[in-house]
């Protein structure tokens, strides 16, 4: 029998947690093993149960989901993080990906997409909602590969960046170059 993906779900709205839990519970390969109503609880639950995947809302009381994502990746690096939110602002996307999130999914997504995202990041891949992917591609076309001071290449240093580079390299990257920090393009 295949291994069950253990998930942590953090959202400050109980009705959202119930709904997402029901969607994930409809897949026999995914089990929600912990829930949290804020970022600090999410970090503590991640430390305690060590889930395969943590799904975090952005706007939560106290510690927000973006800060919680960074902290979870620091203390439980084997846990993949998906930001699951209503808010697709560019600053949130960049903070999530630079903070180590492997996925960014909008709450307008359907149940199958949610399950696909969980399965993808649990398997070591990245998952971006189509609108988020469109933004990231637009940024790459407009600005290339931005390199903030002291941070290295923000896009290719992230789990999502590595997967995206592999995907675009497979189709001939529109940037026509292989970024130096990309591990997947070197593996081709």
Image (cartoon, rainbow, N blue to C red):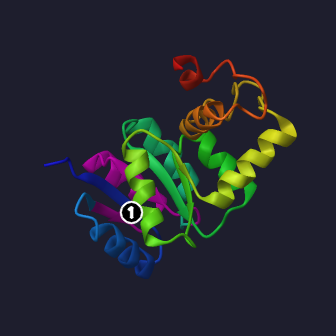
- According to the picture, the residue beneath numbered tag 1 turns out to be 9
State the image quarter where residue 150 is shown: top right
- Residue 187 lies in magenta, yes or no? no
The one nearer the camera, 93 or 29, is 29
Residue at the location (68% across, 33% down)? 154
Give the magenta range.
Answer: 33-59
Relative side of 181 to 111, left or right: right
Residue 21 x, y percent position in the rendering: 34, 71
Q: Is residue 83 visible?
A: yes
The one nearer the camera, 168 or 63, is 168
Residue at the outermost front position: 171
Secondary structure at badge 1 equals strand
Residue 129 drawn above or below residue 145: below
Crowding at dot 1, Cα within 10 Å, few <14 / some 14-19 / many 20+, comes out as many
Residue at the outermost bottom position: 15
State the image quarter where residue 184 is shown: top right
Quadrant of the image for the C terminus? top right
Residue 164 drawn above or below residue 32: above
Residue at the outermost left position: 1
Relative side of 98 to 142, left or right: left
Residue 151 x, y percent position in the rendering: 69, 27
The one nearer the camera, 63 or 79, is 79
Residue 106 x, y percent position in the rendering: 58, 65
Residue at the location (78% across, 40% down)? 140
Residue at the location (51% across, 19% down)? 187
State the image quarter where residue 149 is shown: top right
Residue 174 drawn above or below residue 106: above
């Amino acid at each position: 029998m295949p291994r069950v993906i253990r998930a942590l779900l953090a959202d400050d709205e109980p009705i959202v947690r119930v709904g997402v839990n029901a969607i994930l519970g409809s897949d026999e390969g995914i089990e929600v093993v912990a829930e949290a109503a804020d970022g600090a609880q999410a970090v503590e639950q991640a430390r305690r149960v060590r889930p395969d995947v943590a799904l975090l809302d952005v706007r939560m009381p106290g510690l927000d989901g973006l800060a919680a994502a960074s902290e979870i990746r620091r203390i439980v690096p084997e846990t993949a993080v998906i930001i699951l939110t209503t808010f697709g602002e560019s600053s949130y996307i960049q903070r999530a990906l630079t903070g180590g999130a492997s996925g960014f999914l909008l709450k307008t997504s359907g149940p199958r997409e949610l399950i696909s995202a969980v399965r993808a990041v649990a398997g070591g891949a990245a998952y971006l909602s189509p609108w988020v992917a469109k933004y990231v591609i637009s940024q790459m076309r407009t600005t290339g590969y931005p390199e903030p001071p002291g941070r290295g290449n923000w896009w290719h240093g992230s789990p999502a960046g590595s997967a995206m580079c592999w995907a675009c390299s497979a189709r001939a990257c529109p940037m026509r170059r292989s970024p130096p920090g990309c591990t997947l393009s070197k593996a081709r």
